[in-house]
Amino acid sequence: MKIFYKLLLAGCMASAATNAQTSLPSFVQDNLDSYIQKGMEQWQVPGLAVVIVKDGKIVAMKGYGVKDIQSKSPVDEHTHFFIASNSKLFTGTVLANLEQQKKLNLNDPISKYFPEYKLYTPTSTSLVSIRDMLTHRIGTKTFQGDFTFWNTTLTRKEIMQKMRLLKPSQTFRQDYGYCNSCFMTAGEIVPKVIGKTWEQYVQDSILNVLGMSESFASSNGIQNRSSNIAVPYTTSYSGTLKTVPYDTWDNLGPAASVVSNVHDLSKWLLFQLDSGRVNGERKMPWETLAKTRAMQIVTNSRKSAIYPMNFRGYGLGLNIADYNGRQVYWHTGGAAGMVSNVCFIPDEKLGIAILTNNDNQNFFEMLRYQIMDAFLGVKYVDRSSAALPQFLAAQKEELALIASLRSRVKGNAPPLAFDAYVGDYTNELYGNITVTKTATGLLVRFSKHPTLTAALTYLDNATWLLEYNNIEYGIFPTSFTATPGQPMSLKITVNPFVEYDSYIFTKTK
């Protein structure tokens, strides 16, 4: 491990002599390399990149494993990953900065900029503000509507129009429900006040200013723009690594579309830890960053049984918590085939970014906690080994359920002739799907997802097996409802990674 540490010092942006001034915990200096390699093997993580900054310096920055299991191309500090919801702090920062410049007020109602905009109730429509959008407090469930919005052909304008159909199950401004369409809506305020797209303003005011020249504010088609992009993988629903398509979600851009690497994220972390300065030069007012870090809603106020934490809340694109007496700011990011974490602890002048290309694992989070433990004086517990058994048990249960469903495929005839199920179906929020007959069953096509289909294979007892052509969306039992005198309906369920609730589609012809 000491050899690895010397290589890191030689390869990082700061000189070895400068970095050597920072005293590192023994875990980071002597065991980090082996810990990561072991964890990647146990959690089936093909590739991982990590950067640690401390006291204004990069003290570790390295890629591990491969970005592509076919070509065996290695991950390095320049390998691009989707950072997904870590994009939200970029959105919170540019809007907080526009408020600092007095070009808007975060308490401005959305209707000031979009008079036609509506939420489900007139009261929430009249009250909902930019701040509400940035803090997930409009009363909807976490991920509500995301199947309709994620990787679809809907424009940002069309998504905003559909948000009036999101029926809240919680209380406006009181309850937290993670909302990607809310962040997109907030981002759409940017062109209204400065005449630039959200992407261009992020590029001009953050990426260019901080020298993040290897980062992109949009992700669609990234595989054609980067020769060093990680391939996305999942082990969901199969237990083995499967390639999944890159997300095409620029329609939700302000919530998720930044693509970066640990080389550039080191600059983002150093900027955050130096209160808006780069190499001592002021790039953004401290007041702007302070706005993003002010807790706007409490998400948990119970003491953790596992971590030295007592509270959690959310700012403007940031989770906020205590950790062994220090204030911690972080966010996770989940894209198809990639998960990440970006974290900084100003009290310790410590920043961590971890990027991975398997979305079905918790190692990226366990590694972050392990690094925090080392720097913050928490007694050593192998976080990865402690979390792994529960993950493996849940995975085993999922695979057993899928196997039991497939064992019921015996060529049984459904209650009605196959032709009775064929036709067009609609859901008020999503729109239309079509069901057609195949040689082995039925096939569902989704009007808003041009490349997505789902095969329906009859099992028994009016139950069908639903399998998407993109395994990212899952494998589930489902059913048609055929009540005499009522139109037929079909329940569509997707991976909770996309959306928790099922959709009911009603047959129209």
Image (cartoon, rainbow, N blue to C red):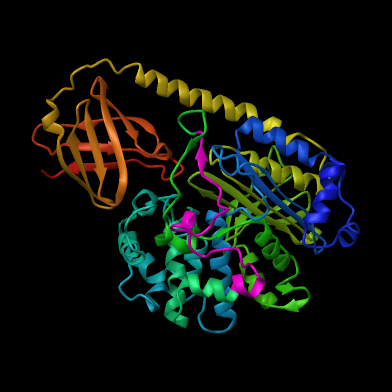
Give the main secondary structure, helix, strand or loop, of the magenta stretch. loop
Residue 120 can be seen, yes or no: no
Residue in the picture at 34% in, 55% down:
166
Residue stretch in magenta = 206-235
Q: Where is residue 484 drawn, in percent x and y? A: 10, 31
Please tell me in which quadrant of the rendered image residue 364 appears: top right
Residue 437 can be seen, yes or no: yes
Residue in the picture at 46% in, 62% down:
253
Of residues 397 and 3, the one drawn nearer to the viewer in this rendering: 3
The mark tally for this picture is 0
Q: Where is residue 100 drawn, in percent x and y? A: 60, 80
Assess whether residue 38 is covered by the magenta stretch. Answer: no
Of residues 343 and 215, the one drawn nearer to the viewer in this rendering: 215
Please tell me in which quadrant of the rendered image residue 20 appears: bottom right
Q: In which quarter of the image is the C terminus?
A: top left
Q: Where is residue 213 drawn, in percent x and y? A: 61, 68
| Residue furthest out toward the bottom | 102
Q: Where is residue 159 drawn, in percent x and y? A: 34, 61
| Residue furthest out toward the left | 485
Q: In which quarter of the image is the N terminus?
A: top right
